[in-house]
Image: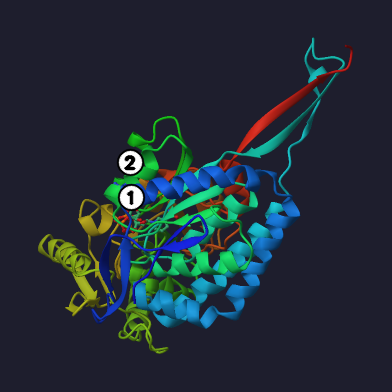
Amino acid sequence: MKRKLFINGSWVGAEHYAPLSSPYDKKVIAEIPIASEADVEKAIEAAHNAFLKMAKMPKHERGHILEKLVMLLDKRKEEAAEIIAKEAAKPIKTALEEVQRTIQTYKFSAEEAKRIHGEALSLDAAPGGENRTAYTVREPIGVIGAITPFNFPMNLVAHKVGPAIASGNTIVLKPASQTPLSAFFIAELLQEAGLPDGALNVVTGSGSIVGKKIVEDERVKMITFTGSPQVGKEIRNKAGLKRVTLELGSNSALIVDEGIDVKSIIPRCVKGAFSNQGQVCISLQRIYVHEHVYDEFVNAFVKETEKLTTGDPLDFQTDVSALISEHDVIRVISWIEEAKKTGAIVATGGNAKGNIVEPTVLLNTKPDMKVSCQEIFGPVVLIEKVSSIEQAVEYVNDSRYGLQAGIYTKNIHHALYAAEELKVGGVMINDIPTFRVDHMPYGGVKESGMGREGIKYAIEEMTELKLVVINRQV
Ligand code: NAP
């Protein structure tokens, strides 16, 4: 079916279309419009024109539109999950979890819309500041360019669209080329929920044309990007003085200390490593286990991994399905092969069947192997032995990334040492690095990005702090 661009509240056709195929069985799911520069221009113009209306809209009205969206999405959640499963090959039960989280993200956005405020300041704390009343307000900044990845096509759109609407901004959204249907679906629901024309525009097409135009246009005041570090760097270089938030990749790690009841944490660790085929920015990629529990951990982890079912994303039994593209299958397998050649041992998995890479556990890896030092973004995890917490923390920090890290320990000193020393945006004590709920501050250090999401924090990024000072003596 031919889909349309969403510009200024209307569904409009494009001059060119590209077929969208399922990553799992290659069947064509839809024909996707390829926006021209002129289409993107119209979308930016529409967002620019709608800004005043959104900025002046009372906060309860913005909240109401988002509440209505929550209701509509809740009613159609099975349909939404099916869209995600088809376009991203996300196993349907994982896709349903994403839809539930998307609902949460918009719910928090509706609530936060009513809590945007500044503070009163005591200027007389400084000599010369007497007899003045001062306060700050938070104002929306204008048109926001949102560029999103394929791996959470609905919830990562929500993390940009929700806070942008809540804070009175307007949006031009470019979803990943492989997963535009989730974005179109949300645009349809938001229109039904009463969002003014032009407040959200969805333009599909390549990053290098559509994305580039959004990044370079002067009317766009902020770019909120989630995706790879490589594209993130390119965007930052082109964005000039625009505000930019970058939510990028990682090779997230977990430390397992001695004294831990290994069996009780295994199912959660396995889920953290292989959920959505490991295509999660905080997927568990590296595990550093204390030598006293290492053998027990590896045996139990491999056993649990071998219970996973691979197959059709639309089958409720499936835990692991196809990677997003053939190119990624070839890349992941070549990284495993490279690791094997330089001494790594495959404890389980290691092969591909069609576009599905088997859940793979590697042992005896070295820090400079690609499977360790780069973001694998596939169903591959490595488990290494350490003799102390200090050594484990050093290994975790030996990374160009720093999104989240986890540590399981019963020792409070070790927990606090890890909390202080780990160079990441978030430390999860007694949990995997993959833990996320949608209102917590979320973002990375080093090449994992800059700025924070999590509705309240995204709203801070999407608003300008303005100071008002009243001189009472005039
Ligand atoms: P990607 O290749 O960087 O693409 C992300 C988005 O950027 C897509 O919409 C893409 O469009 C667009 N794009 C590509 N080149 C561009 C350019 N030159 N200018 C502007 N936009 C451009 O990432 P992906 O493969 O979709 O997603 C995987 C990555 O996202 C991983 O690194 C993962 O860790 C990261 N991620 C991070 C978070 C987080 O919150 N930190 C969450 C999820 C994912 P096309 O699809 O048309 O190429």
Within 8 Å of ligand 1, the CB of disc 1? yes
Q: Secondary structure at mark 2?
A: helix
Q: Amino acid at mark 1?
A: Val
Q: Position of residue 425 (x, y in %)?
A: 49, 48
Q: Is residue 223 visible?
A: yes
Q: Nearer the viewer, residue 64 or 394?
A: 64
Q: Which mark is residue 275?
A: none
Q: In screen coordinates, is 48 left or right of 445?
A: right
Between disc 1 and disc 2, whose residue precedes?
Answer: 1
**Whether residue 116 is situated above or below residue 376 in the rendered picture:** above
Q: Nearer the viewer, residue 190 or 118?
A: 190
What residue is shown at x 37% (from left), y 51% (from top)?
39
According to the picture, the residue beneath numbered tag 1 turns out to be: 210
Q: Which mark is residue 233?
A: 2
Q: Position of residue 381 (x, y in %)?
A: 31, 67
Q: Nearer the viewer, residue 204 or 253?
A: 204
**Whether residue 328 is situated above or below residue 48 in the rendered picture:** below
Q: Position of residue 75 (x, y in %)?
A: 60, 80
* Circle nearer the viewer, 1 or 2: 1
